[in-house]
Amino acid sequence: MSSFVGASGLGETEAVYRLGRFAFENGGEIPDMKVGYVTWGALNAARSNAILLVPGTSGTRHSYDAHIGPGKTYDTDKYFVIGADPIGGGTSSQPKDGLGTAFPRYTIRDMVRAQQAMVTKGLGISKLFAVGGSSMGSFQTVEWGINFPGVMRGLIMLVPAARSDNHFAAVVDAFEAMITLDPAYQGGRYTVNPEEGIRRAALIYFPWMSSDEYLISLDDKAYEAAKQAAGERWVKEWDANSMLWRYFASRGHDASKPFGGDMMKALGMIKAPALLLPSMTDRTIPGYLTRELHRGLRGQVVYAEIPSIRGHSASGAVPGTAEYAYVSQKIRGFLGGLGE
């Protein structure tokens, strides 16, 4: 465990929890599961002010940094904030550690079981003030609510759903083909990351992250810059097998699977109040999936659409934008309503 002052000027504590042998939902195991995380702020005397934040598919433990700090969305003068790396990326166990394609195909529920061990055994926290995340982070948040219904006071979900569908599967299948067709991929046994395949896969995913209205608002220079930035970010941050395995987890997620396909039964397990912040122009997680999630939540729910043309990217990660201000206001209001 190491403490340092991050780029934001905040004191951050980076750590990795080793939970030992871990068996995966769909088979296979590894002898030493690692869960990477970072914390900000301090636990109160009652150890009741911890907020766990989990990222989207290509995100990390630092995905919500812009919202964390004194007086910000996740106010570190009030809350002990934990940013977690799900299985498969960041400083958590993943294919690039050495197993490559032999790394088990993990699920969203595997991620949540590992996170729960990190929170309870690694940090000694039995109750969370809230759990939250966007996109795949909402998948994880749903599973936290289903599997550990008495653990948190509230759930925060941005661009949310409780499952993926076939249109997202088609996108993932297309960029999987792009990566695996790169000669450098070598059937997953590469020694040099197949960067060109990753860049081209990003081109497939790029339009799904926004909307037609947003894309036509860009001039040629801005469009080319945005398109290139998507590919360069993936190349910089991701190993090909680790990226594929992470997207496979999102592609295959369905919270109803352990309940015989009954989504209403699955979501009926959730007891905590929930905040749902969908994007009105999202086409990665279309509105019908968010409405399905909304219908299944039987407790207190706050539902507010983010007014934006940025599509799935409207989850408010960029300071100074209208989306950031809107998301921050809604989350701060929701957290305030959960009490102290």
Image: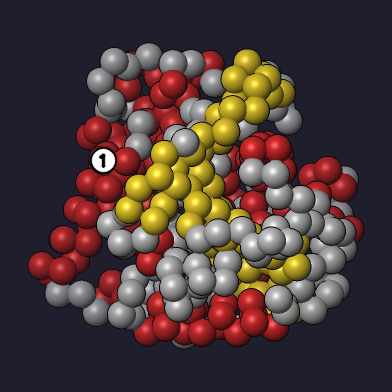
Give the residue drawn at x 50%, y 52%.
Answer: 39
Name the one closer to the observer, 146 or 49: 49
Give the residue drawn at x 27%, y 53%.
Answer: 230
Name the one closer to the observer, 86 or 66: 66
Q: Residue 219: in sight, yes or no?
A: yes
Q: Position of residue 253 (x, y in %)?
A: 66, 46
Q: Residue 303: in sight, yes or no?
A: no
Q: Position of residue 135 (x, y in %)?
A: 54, 59
* In-image side of 158 versus 242 (left or right): right
Vertical placement of residue 302 versus 143, above or below: below
Q: Which amino acid does the dot numbered 1 rest on?
A: Lys
* In-image side of 265 versus 53 (left or right): right
Q: Residue furthest left?
A: 221
Give the residue drawn at x 28%, y 26%.
Answer: 193
Q: Position of residue 204 (x, y in %)?
A: 34, 50
Pointer 1 local density, CA inside 10 Å: few below 14, some 14–19, many at least 20: few
Name the one closer to the observer, 48 or 101: 48
Count how many numbered circles sit on residues in the image.
1
Give the residue drawn at x 76%, y 73%.
Answer: 273
* In-image side of 328 versus 220 (left or right): right
**Mark 1 falls on what kind of element?**
helix
Q: Quadrant of the C terminus?
A: bottom right
Q: Tell me, what colour scheme is on the image?
A: secondary structure
**Residue under label 1:** 236
The image quadrant that residue 296 belongs to is: bottom right
Vertical placement of residue 251 versus 135, above or below: above
